[in-house]
Each structure stands twice: as C-alpha cells, then as structure tokens.
C-alpha cells in the first residue's frame, strides 16, 4: 500500500478516471455496433457524425490510439457509403 498522501490520492483519482474511461469506451463501442447493424442509409448518416465525434474524443484523451480511431472512422464511412 502507498505510504504518501499524494500516492493515495493518485490511486483514488486513477480509479475514478479508469471508470470514466471504461464507460466512454464501452458507450462508443456500442454506438459503433449499432451503426454497423443499421440497414437504412438515412439513419446511418444521422448517427455517423455522433459516432465519429465519440471516437475523436476517445483518441484525444488517449483512451484509444489515434490510428485506431482513424481506422474505425474509415471503416464506418465505407459502411455508410455502401448502404
């Protein structure tokens, strides 16, 4: 166990951040799955910008790698265009 006050605070803050990051990452993954399951082009086109925004935010906060976000956005764009 940590011996310093600052280390104890770091443990608490890391756990809080981990839970927030986990929530945002899971929410984004669910949104991606929902977008991939859509067959209606209009619905997909309305949902696509919000999913891209979520991915950009995750990449900005280093929850996912920037290249992974780019790959996911590219794949989703192709999917929406193909509908």
Image (tube, rainbow, N blue to C red):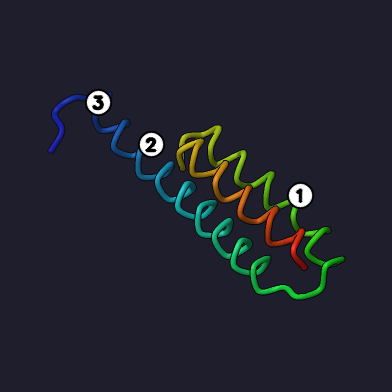
According to the image, label 2 marks what residue?
Answer: 13
Q: Residues within 10 Å of mark 2 (few under 14, many from 20)?
A: few
Q: Quadrant of residue 12?
A: top left
Residue 17 lies left or right of residue 79; in this view the side is left
Percent x, y of residue 77: 70, 53
- Of 14 and 33, which appears nearest the observer? 33
Q: Which mark is residue 30?
A: none
According to the image, label 1 marks what residue?
Answer: 49
Label 1 or label 2, whichever lies nearer to me, is 1
Q: Quadrant of the C terminus?
A: bottom right
Q: Quick one: SS at disc 1? A: helix
How many marks the image carries: the answer is 3
Percent x, y of residue 72: 57, 51
N-terminal of the pair, mark 1 or mark 3, is 3
Q: Which mark is residue 5?
A: 3
**Alpha-carbon span between mark 2 and mark 3:** 12 Å
Label 2 or label 3, whichever lies nearer to me, is 2
């Amino acid at each position: 166990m940590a011996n310093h006050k600052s280390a104890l605070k770091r443990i608490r803050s890391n756990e809080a951040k981990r839970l927030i990051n986990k929530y945002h990452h899971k929410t984004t993954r669910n949104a991606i799955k929902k977008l991939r399951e859509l067959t209606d082009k209009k619905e997909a086109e309305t949902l696509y910008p919000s999913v891209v925004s979520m991915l950009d935010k995750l990449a900005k906060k280093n929850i996912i790698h920037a290249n992974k976000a780019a790959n996911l956005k590219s794949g989703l764009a192709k999917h929406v265009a193909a509908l």
